[in-house]
Image (cartoon, helix red, strand yellow):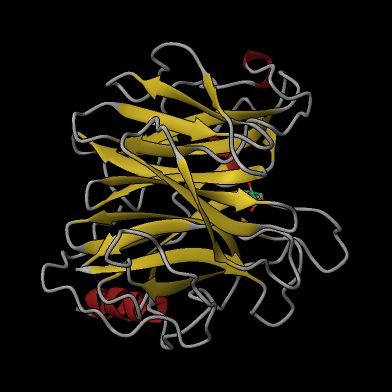
Amino acid sequence: MFKQLLIASAVLAAVSAHAGNPVVKDRFTADPAVLVDNGRVYLYTGHDEATETTGTYLMNDWRVYSSCDMQHWTDHGSPLKLSDFKWAKKDAFAADVTKRNGKYYIYAPVNHATVPGFAIGVAVSDKPTGPFVDARGSALVTNDMTKESPISWDDIDPAVFIDDNGQAYLYWGNTVLKYAKLKPNMIELDGPIHTQGMDNFVEAPYLHKHGGTYYLSYSRNFPEETAYMTGPSATGPWTYRGVIMNKNTHTKTIHQAIVDFNGKSYIFYHNTAVPGGGEDRRSVAVEEFQYAADGTIPFIAQTVDGPAPNPSKGCAAVQTR
Ligand code: FUB
């Protein structure tokens, strides 16, 4: 009984008491990725550990949170760490997540220990909250596989998308957007790496589908604003639709993820609104928005209040480790 009380109080302590933005207030988080699973929304974030004097990113793990109403978030800790990729040396940058055949996959960019530059790893778990393990024991993408850009950080920011016919795609890049098919096993590329011309693409590609239209959103210009394109398939052809969120004031990045949850639409992004925030001490926030009748996304302002409550009746009990 005493043990049960201890567990219950630990769970309660992990539930955020205050709604509103930023979503996470007790640490710096960045680079949101979102997965809706069994009526519950899971938010995966990067974790900014830089101090005010570090002067660059310090990111060693990813975090995961979940909510049944878009207001109250439960902290599930770290599902995956940089050190879980034995071949990686630093920089747990922006990851993305999906579910296939009952397994959860995180695609994560990290600096490779032996192949100069960034690389993308893939980790797998039976639960959305992890723990995730390196699914390959090696990188899925390394910098020497892509020659379109001379920079060492062009293989970052993976976004994974599974189309209605089961074909999975991985999109990623900095400066140049790249994409490739994934095999059904989700841990190997299936065919060549393609590039996609974009309007002032910087990073953070994100592919989602809504109402039969494919949306490819991304960070445009630097400092970054969020822009998007639409198309009739997961590979385009794409039509540029404009900017949907303005650049931040105290960080040059913004990194969005867009999702439908419980009948409403949301955009996650990061800013620097937690006290002490800054360029590499960012905070994930969320806004609700509505698609226009023609399927376009309106300009979305950042708010302090965040979304109204949206309790999901089908919200499953959280799956923990
Ligand atoms: O968090 C490190 C990098 O900053 C991400 O990979 C980019 O999307 C930008 O947010």
The x, y position of residue 78, in whole percent, is 48, 55
Residue ranking furthest to the top? 191
Residue 195, quarter of the rendered image: top right
The x, y position of residue 223, in whole percent, is 74, 58
Whether 289 is drawn above or below 176: the answer is below
The residue at the point 60 percent across, 71 percent down is 27
Residue ranking furthest to the left? 314
Residue 142, quarter of the rendered image: top right
Q: Is 16 on the left-hand or right-hand side of 162?
A: right
The x, y position of residue 296, in whole percent, is 37, 60
The x, y position of residue 139, in whole percent, is 55, 22
Q: Nearer the viewer, residue 294 or 116?
A: 294
The residue at the point 46 percent across, 88 percent down is 305
Residue 210 visible in the picture: yes
Residue 106 visible in the picture: no
Q: Nearer the viewer, residue 240 or 157?
A: 240
